Structures are given as structure tokens and as C-alpha cells.
Image: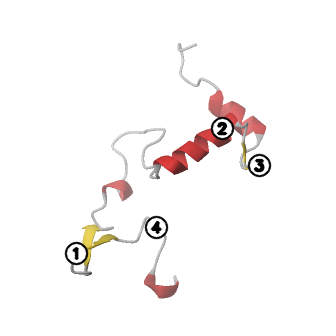
Amino acid sequence: MPGGRGPPRRRPLCERAPDKSLRLVDDPARRRLTRPPALESGGGGLVGTIDDYARFCQMLLGGGQLAGTRVLGRPTVELMRTNHLPGWG
């Protein structure tokens, strides 16, 4: 990608030190989030801010719409709201 930047999962996570230098915080080669999971998990590997999650929840409450824009189809939202665990309802 331009500027040597790749997809977010492939970029190193750095932070700016008080002296304005960059310090490596998370190396993509050893990143926990890019390793195969030890077990299947519905939300495993998802990364975002609380604001992102709140907007996602608002979209689900809106039946797949957020701020007047359809993000997911109604059948998809209904499928997401359906219990898929046997014996739980």
C-alpha cells in the first residue's frame, strides 16, 4: 500500500514517546490477535473502540439501519438475534 502502510492487522502498533520518537508497542510478527485461535469464539479477534461498539449496537436496535443508512438487511439482523445454542430457549 502507499506509504508502506498495510491493512490495520498487518501494521505495527506504535506510540509516541515524550521525546517524540516512536516506540513499538505491538509487533505484527508476534501479535496475539493475528495468531490462530485456541478455540472458536463468536467475538474473538474483533477489535474496536467502545464508540464503535455502541454504534454497532444502535444499528442492531435499528433493525440494521444506522443514521438512516441500511447497514445490514433485516433477515441478517433477525438471524443474528436468533438463539443458536441448543437447549437455551
Q: Is residue 80 left or right of residue 63?
A: left
The percent coordinates of residue 50 (x first, y second) are 47, 47
Where disc 3 sits, the SS reads: strand
> Of tags 4 and 1, which is closer to the observer?
1
Q: Can you identify the residue that label 3 sits on? A: 70
User: Three-letter amino acid code at disc 4?
Assistant: Pro
Q: Residues within 10 Å of mark 1 (few under 14, many from 20)?
A: few
User: Three-letter amino acid code at disc 2?
Assistant: Leu
N-term mark: 4 or 1: 4
Q: CA distance from mark 3 to mark 4?
A: 25 Å
| Depicted 80 relative to depicted 87: above or below | below
Which residue appears at 31% of the width and 71% of the height?
14
Residue 8: mark: 4
> Of tags 2 and 1, which is closer to the observer?
1
Q: Can you identify the residue that label 1 sits on? A: 18
Q: Nearer the viewer, residue 44 or 57?
A: 57
Where disc 4 sits, the SS reads: loop
N-term mark: 3 or 4: 4
| Depicted 24 relative to depicted 71: above or below | below
Residue 60: mark: 2
